[in-house]
Image (spheres, rainbow, N blue to C red):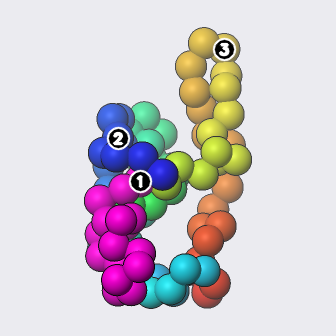
Amino acid sequence: MSSPGVNVTVGQQEERMMMSGLHTVEDIFCCSCGQIIGWKYVVAHDKNEKYKEGKFVLERWRITEVNEGLNLDGHSGSSDAETP
C-alpha cells in the first residue's frame, strides 16, 4: 500500500466488498496505456480499516518490465474484490 502515485489516473468511486470489509474505492489506471493497475481506498467503512484511506494498492502481477520501462500485460479484474 502506498501514498499518491505518479503517472496514474483514477476512475469513478464505487462501493466494493473487499476481504477486509466494505470500502469506497477508485480504480487506478496507467497514464501511458490506460490499463487498470490497482485501486485507491477513498473511504473505509470499518473504523479499524481507516488507515487505508487515501492509500493506493498496485497489483504487481499487472505490471511487467519491458526493455527499460514498465508495461502492463493487460489482465482485467481485481484481485481483492469478492464480487466481480
Name the residue located 33 percent from the left edge and 35 percent from the top edge. Answer: 6
- Distance between the alpha carbons at the discs numbered 2 and 1: 7 Å
- Distance between the alpha carbons at the discs numbered 2 and 3: 22 Å
Number of the front mark, 2 or 3: 2
Which image quarter holds the C terminus?
bottom right
User: Could you tell me the amino acid type at mark 2?
Assistant: Gly
To which residue does mark 2 refer? 5
To which residue does mark 3 refer? 67
Q: What mark, if any, has residue 4 been given in the picture?
A: none
Left or right? Give the position of 33 relative to 71.
left
Asked which quadrant contains residue 18, the reply is: bottom right
**Among numbered discs 3 and 1, the one appearing first in the sequence:** 1
Left or right? Give the position of 79 relative to 8.
right
User: Could you tell me the amino acid type at mark 1?
Assistant: Phe
To which residue does mark 1 refer? 56
Residue 74 is covered by the magenta coloring: no
User: Could you tell me the amino acid type at mark 3?
Assistant: Asn
**Among numbered discs 2 and 3, the one appearing first in the sequence:** 2
Q: Does residue 23 appear in the picture of this structure?
A: no
Name the residue located 35 percent from the left edge and 35 percent from the top edge. Answer: 7
Asked which quadrant contains residue 64, the reply is: top right
Using the image as rendered, state which of residue 19 and residue 67 is in the foreground: 19
Indicate the secondary structure of the residue bearing disc 3: loop
Query: Do the numbered discs 2 and 3 sit on residues whose CB atoms are within 8 Å?
Result: no
- Distance between the alpha carbons at the discs numbered 3 and 1: 26 Å
- Name the spot of residue 79 as percent of width and height, x first: 65, 67
